[in-house]
Each structure stands twice: as C-alpha cells, then as structure tokens.
Amino acid sequence: MNEPSKLLKNMRRYYKRSLPKHTLSVTEDQDPTIIVVIPAYHELQLFRTIHSLDKNNSVDFEVHVIVVLNSTESSPTSVVNIHRKQSNDLKRESFQQITVHPILIESTPDKIGGVGFARKYGMDIAHNYFLEAGTPYGLIACLDGDCTVSINYLEELRRFQQQATFHAGHFYFEHEFPSDKRNRKAIIEYELHLRLMYQNLRYIGHPQAFHAVGSCLVVFAWAYAAQGGMNTRQAGEDFYFIHKFTKIGRATSLNMATVYPSARQSDRVPFGTGAAINKFLRGQNQMTYNFKSYQALAHFLAAIPGFYTENYNGLNYLYGFKEIEIKKRIEEARNNSTDGHSFGKRFLQFFDAFQVIKFLHYLRDRKYPDVAPLEAYNTLSPLIQLPRMGCSEDALIELRKLEKSVLAE
C-alpha cells in the first residue's frame, strides 16, 4: 500500500476542484469505509435497488448509500415532484444494514445535467468524506437506480477493499430478462454484443479488454482522485472512467458477486442499454462488429514492436485510419522510450480502448460491415472452444458461463 499521508495530499488537491456543495453527514458512532453512489433520474424502482442492498448477507461494517436525485432546467415538474417525494421517503425510512443519504439537486443546467454529472456529484461527496475522515482506502461503489445486486455484493466490496491489490474494479453483470418477448430479445441481443466485443478483444490480446457498465464500478477514494475523478459526460462516462485504470493495468474484474441491470428502454442517452433497447423496439436490429475487423486490429497490434525499429509495414492493417496522427504518436513514443517494451506500453496509452472503438467504427463504415450477434458468436465460438448455437439466448448463456469460469481462475 502507498503511504496514507501522500495519498491524502493528492486527495486534497482533487478536493479543490470537486463539484459538491453537499457534504455527507454521519453520526459520531458511524465510520463508513464503503459508500455506494446511486444517480437517479425518474427512477420509479429506486426503492427496489436500495432494498436489494439492504437485504444482502449480514455484514459487520458500515455501508452508506448516497442517492443523487438530479433534475435539470428542462425536467418536467412531475419528475421534480417525484424526486422530492423520494427524498422525503428515504429520510423517513429506516434500513437494517445501510444508511441512506438522499441528495436533491434541481435545475442543473441542461448542458451538463445527466448521469455523468449525477454520478460524479455523488462520487465527489464520497471522496470528500473519506478525505475529511483521513481514509484514503475508503471504497466508492457505483450502482444505478434501476438495478439489483446479488446477496453477497457487500461482502465482495469488503473483500476487494481488504485486498487493496487493484485501484478499481468492475463487477460481473447480467441484465434482467423481461417477460415481454420483444424486450427480452432486445436485451439478449445487446448484451450478446457487449460480451462479444469483450471476448474478441481478449482473443486478439488487447490489454484493455474490459467491460464498462456504470452500475458495476468500484474504486478506492485515493485512486479516484489520482485519476481526476468521474467525468460529467451525458453518456459513456463509465467507459472513459474505467479505462483510466485499464491503461495503467490497475483494474480488475470482480466476478464473485453480480449486478443485475434492468432492460428498460430510454431516450435519455444516445447510446448504452436504454438506447439500444429503444432502437430494437423501433425495428432497428442490434448488430455487432465483424470478426474481420478484429483480425485487422490483431495484425496491427502484432506489428507494434516493429514500429520501434521503424518497420511500418503493420500500418497497412489500419486501412488509412488516422495514419498521419498514428505516425506522429509512434515517433513521440519512440523518442520517449528506452526499448521496444517501453515503447509498446507508451504507444498503447494512445491507441487505447477509445481508439479501438473508433477503429472498429471506421472499418465498419468502410470495409467490414457489422453482422448479427449470433453470426458473430458462431464465428468466434470455435476459436474460444465454445459450441455453435442456433439462437442468441443460448449463445449469451454460453458467454456468461465462460466469463464466470475464466474470471474465477
């Protein structure tokens, strides 16, 4: 572990630019070292999420929950009123294992309001509390207001905290399957797409192959500050946050407990679960990246060591993607590296998970069109020793089992 005094010094630097006007109020007999943050906008099943936490296996440590009820300038009055009622109800209700702190934020500017802002606001409150308490190894976990957790979720948070091997983690997840057939099909196709992306990147050996589901994140307070905290993006905030840690090799998968995100449709964000469900229900089938795109990426990754010795043949596999910028980045990495190994690590700080997604989109639009998830699964499955499947649900079940078994090793 790092020296606590140094970590707290860095946390004090972050505190100066943190968002909240709110602080976390705890009594003298409370000493939380785990704080769960839940951003909530018009979450009618919010109490289901909170009760899922409260019904976890009995624990002997303090767990506090910050619920950020966030509305914007253009939010309907009906939503604002729902938030006010939820805030009052949360203050009145008593829980067995958790202490809940509703934070009511209204009239946030539309330009910045959204899940990223609300998540950051709550995480900043948690960070600031741990700074005040002198607890750099306090743990900040994220959920969403429409999900549930397995009964050992809190226990696994504690285990991760006590080991303190990594800076951040991501829980295993399984979307709930709705009873409605079309909704069920929609979420199966979308989750299959997510798992195929993860498995293909693992197969070709990209070091930043990682899921990025906001309700599955967990991070130490000191590490949260060290990486500049959560961002305020209105979508994709989870992707950018977790990959701050994959880029430095300090993120891990937590598979012994499960988060169950809901499978509802939503117009609030341009991509992600809700948007994918909405598009599917409007008749736009879920597609996923072509395996040939991953093969091109694999060839490019294999060629990276050669760039250090000015062998640029591997650039052909980019098919023109950002070629001028990438040559510049190669030169920068070479000038700041002492050997091929350090060069490769430095170059992948640029050609990270975000650039990978942009590259896959580039090939999708110019060379290798997207394919149906089941087709993509049956292309990959023999390469990772899984059986071919005749339907997407069976394919998804196979990938779920694989992830659980591999992550458990």
Image: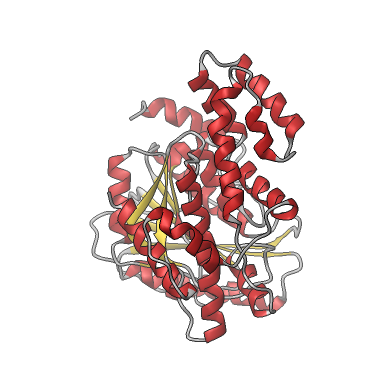
Q: Position of residue 117 (x, y in %)?
A: 63, 54
Query: In the picture shown, does residue 178 fall above or below 114?
Result: below
Horizontal placement of 341 versus 258: left or right? right
Query: In the picture shown, does residue 174 fall above or below 334?
Result: below
The residue shown at (50%, 65%) is 192
Q: Quadrant of the N terminus?
A: top left
Horizontal placement of 256 versus 141: left or right? left
Work out whether residue 31 or residue 5 is closer to the camera in this orientation and state it: 5
Work out whether residue 311 or residue 234 is closer to the camera in this orientation and state it: 311
Q: Position of residue 342 (x, y in %)?
A: 50, 21
Q: Position of residue 52 (x, y in %)?
A: 37, 71
Horizontal placement of 284 versus 189: left or right? right
The residue shown at (65%, 28%) is 313
Q: Can the viewer see residue 20? A: no
Q: Toward which corner of the image does residue 162 lie, by quadrant?
A: top left
Q: Toward which corner of the image does residue 381 lie, by quadrant?
A: bottom left
Work out whether residue 371 or residue 133 is closer to the camera in this orientation and state it: 371
